[in-house]
Image (tube, rainbow, N blue to C red):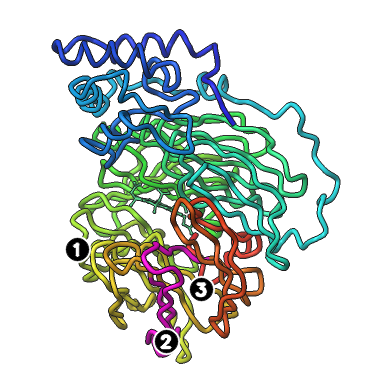
Amino acid sequence: MIRLIASSDRASLLALALAALAPVGAAAQDAAALYAEHCAACHGEGRLGGQGPVLIPETLGRLKGERLEAVIRDGRPATQMPAFGEVLGETEIAALAAWLHEPVEPLPVWGMAEIAASREMSGDYTPAAAPVFEPDPMNITLVVEKGDHHVSVLDGDSFAILDRFPTPYAVHGGVKFSPDGRFAYIMSRDGWVQKYDIWSLAEVGRVRAGINARNIALSHDGRWLAVANYLPRSLSILDAGTLEPVRVIDVIARDGTPSRVSAVYQAPQRKSFILALKDAPEIWEIATDPDAGPFYEGFVHSREAGMVEAVGAEEGLFARRRILLEEPIDDFFFTTDYRHLIGASRDGSRGVVVNLNVGRVVAELPLPGMPHLGSGISWTMADGRRVMATPHLKEGKLTVIDTETFEVVKVIETLGPGFFLRSHENTPYLWADVFFGPNRDVMHVIDKQSLEIVRTLRPVPGATVAHVEFDRDGSHAFVSVWEDEGALIVYDAATLEEVTRLPMRKPSGKYNVWNKIRFSEGTSH
Ligand code: DHE
């Protein structure tokens, strides 16, 4: 579905565009003029998106140099991005690609007014009184198809697709569900948040909560939806019912440095959001409890063990608490009781354990090879020990950690670095993909007790397989063949035999309503 920036924002976007197009040399001028002529109509005058995606360094990421030039020259198949190879010469394409990686300055404003103006509620949406389908609404799994920016609604019993709807561009991070499992919230890297009614199989509406966003989290009571932003440096809080903005919190470190928010997490037992700051050695906790008491009353926990200093009188809903660290950490794994988190050190060599109650680092552990703690999952061993496992983005191994002592229990060697881990309380196995390198077409199945690989699946030789979700009772595992002409493969989770294969366009994350709202063991939250 095509979405255009609201007309009320055009004036400010034009101002931004003029700033972004400010001359910094002839090449830049030329590139800016080329952009205005050929790209602005779809990607916005200020490069902040429109019918096409945002084109700024933060969203382009690794798409740079020859890869970006190739997209401009050849277009993108199965999208509305045309090939400009016949209109622009090689020098012009190279200049344009280089210019797109220049930051937009000054940083765009995206506050309450801009968010509110972007909100679009679906005119034809009527909430159904009961699910409009027969199957169990708690056994629905949403499958994000990155290939053509859609979500498929999968019935976990019959494996039928009940609906397939368009999403904003470049959905990232976990889809979140209202506590009753009825509504789904889907976020794109361009900052759009889409609300979908599973009972009605219909979009409720969408709103742009940031310009470059990371992920979303729903409060413990389902009332507030927090959006972590890189651009601007803020946390946007929306009313989860209406999608109206209720608060934009500028994320400014104690020393005055504005910081990107790497991610926001729901901490249900704590009745709070936990924020990972990218550019500051701080963790923030934001209360989602209107009665948040002295715990939140504006205390800063200092680097010295356990000392606290009062800095204000923040209390009640959205009160903020800072935890000061020696260095920024992000990509958090939370223990089941939300008392501790493990974060990854910036150099990707260590895990840092923070006790959220006392607000300080209580342990460190060796985790070389860039642990991907956000994908960590936990379970209980036969001897009663509660453990967690994390993949590593740069090494072919999984590390299993005791979550009481924070000691390494075992390092499991795999056929390459993986991205995601998944399990379910009713299955004896955890499933670990290999996402990078020559063996990215395999999925390891590992026994949760012996910690040995019991099967290595290679369903489509040469095709990336990644990310697993289970149905409600854990009897089936859904695996993505992460390719443009990809598929969702359904496995019997006990026999590990293939049950069926559904063609899909680059399926990525999959989210089962029941497993997510019940915080199923084996799901990363
Ligand atoms: Fe993700 C979840 C961060 C790259 C696909 N990713 C998350 C979450 C974070 C995160 C903080 C947790 C969100 C939540 O649960 O709400 N991801 C990052 C990065 O920092 C990183 C490494 C670099 C970046 O560009 O942002 C990164 N992620 C990727 C990809 O390249 C992936 C494979 C493809 C994509 O869509 O961009 C990717 N990330 C995912 C998926 C989830 C996710 C599918 C949800 C997993 C789940 O099971 O909940």
**Residue under circle 2?**
454
Left or right of residue 130, residue 283 in this image: left
Residue 453 colored in magenta in the image: yes
Say which of marks 1 and 3 sits in front: 3
**Residue under circle 3?**
423
Residue range (magenta): 442-468
Q: Which residue in the rendered view is the most extreme toward the front?
A: 86
Query: Callout 3: few (<14), some (14-19), or many (20+) C-alpha neighbours within 10 Å?
Result: many
Alpha-carbon distance for marks 2 and 3? 14 Å
Determine whether 403 is above or below 485 in the image.
Answer: below
Left or right of residue 242, residue 49 in this image: left
Between discs 1 and 2, the one toward the N terminus: 1
Say which of marks 2 and 3 sits in front: 2
Q: Which residue in the rendered view is the most extreme toward the right?
A: 129
Q: Is mark 1 within 8 Å of ligand 1?
A: no
Determine whether 193 is above or below 415 in the image.
Answer: above
- Where is residue 259 shown, x and y percent of the image? 30, 36
Say which of marks 1 and 2 sits in front: 2
- Where is residue 58 shown, x and y percent of the image? 31, 35
The amino acid type found where label 1 is placed reads: Ser
Question: Which of the numbered marks, if any, corresponds to residue 349?
Answer: 1
Alpha-carbon distance for marks 1 and 2? 28 Å
The amino acid type found where label 2 is placed reads: Val
Q: Tag 3's secondary structure?
A: loop
- Where is residue 325 shown, x and y percent of the image? 25, 52
Between discs 2 and 3, the one toward the N terminus: 3
Question: Which of the numbered marks, if any, corresponds to residue 302?
Answer: none
